[in-house]
Amino acid sequence: MFTGRCRIPLSQVGEGVSTFTLSVGFTDLVGETDSRFPDNMVVEVEITPVDDDFLSRLRVSTKIRLICDRCGETFSRELEGRVDTVYTQDPVRSGNEDADMRWLPPEQNFIDVADDIRDALILAVPDKCLCREDCKGLCVRCGANLNKTTCVCPKNKEDSRWDALKNIKFD
């Protein structure tokens, strides 16, 4: 286990599949802390040499703190992301934007998976963050959190701004 490091030495990559487990803090990725990621991330990387390239299959798991889109409460959830990347020493192929390829200079003796970890995290964060599937959200009138309390607002109060539309006659 490489603690707090994002580099895998090529000298430790054997024939077939080589598996590595890393413990990576958010500061190892961006150089600063982030309260959304309170714990270290567990990163599992499988590296397979293929000709002069290296196929990397990366899985990252961690806990993330989010804010619910409906009620505004902070909550924590497990987050898991995956990314597959080919590290190549061929500069022409590494410029291919359609493929998940990264340039690996021939003189470099390690694979730095920090960008892959960031990509996996970005892809794993949900578009819609809900503290729970049945979150009731906030009352549109008084702002009460309907998960914690029942508001006393009238339920079917009509909006008087629409009254003029009631008088329209269609033939």
Image (cartoon, rainbow, N blue to C red):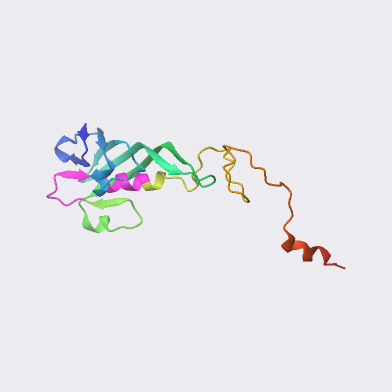
Give me the residue at 26% from left, 46% from top.
29
Residue 143, given in percent of the width and then of the height, sits at 58, 48
Q: 89 or 112, which is in the foreground?
A: 112
Regarding residue 113, the answer to whether it shows in the image is no
Q: Is residue 119 magenta?
A: yes
In the displayed image of the protein, which residue is found farthest to the left?
A: 107
Tell me which segment is drawn in magenta: 104-121
Q: Is residue 28 magenta?
A: no
Q: Is residue 52 above or below residue 165?
A: above
Tell me the quarter of the image containing the C terminus: bottom right
- Left-right relation of 44 to 168: left
Give me the residue at 36% from left, 43% from top.
36
Regarding residue 96, the answer to whether it shows in the image is yes
Q: 157 or 32, which is in the foreground?
A: 157
Residue 118, given in percent of the width and then of the height, sits at 32, 47
Tell me the quarter of the image containing the N terminus: top left
Residue 20, given in percent of the width and then of the height, sits at 24, 33
Residue 105, given in percent of the width and then of the height, sits at 16, 52
Give me the residue at 71% from left, 47% from top.
154
Q: Is residue 147 above or below residue 166?
A: above
Count of numbered tags: 0
Q: Quadrant of residue 145?
A: top right
In the displayed image of the protein, which residue is found farthest to the right?
A: 171
Q: 158 or 75, which is in the foreground?
A: 158
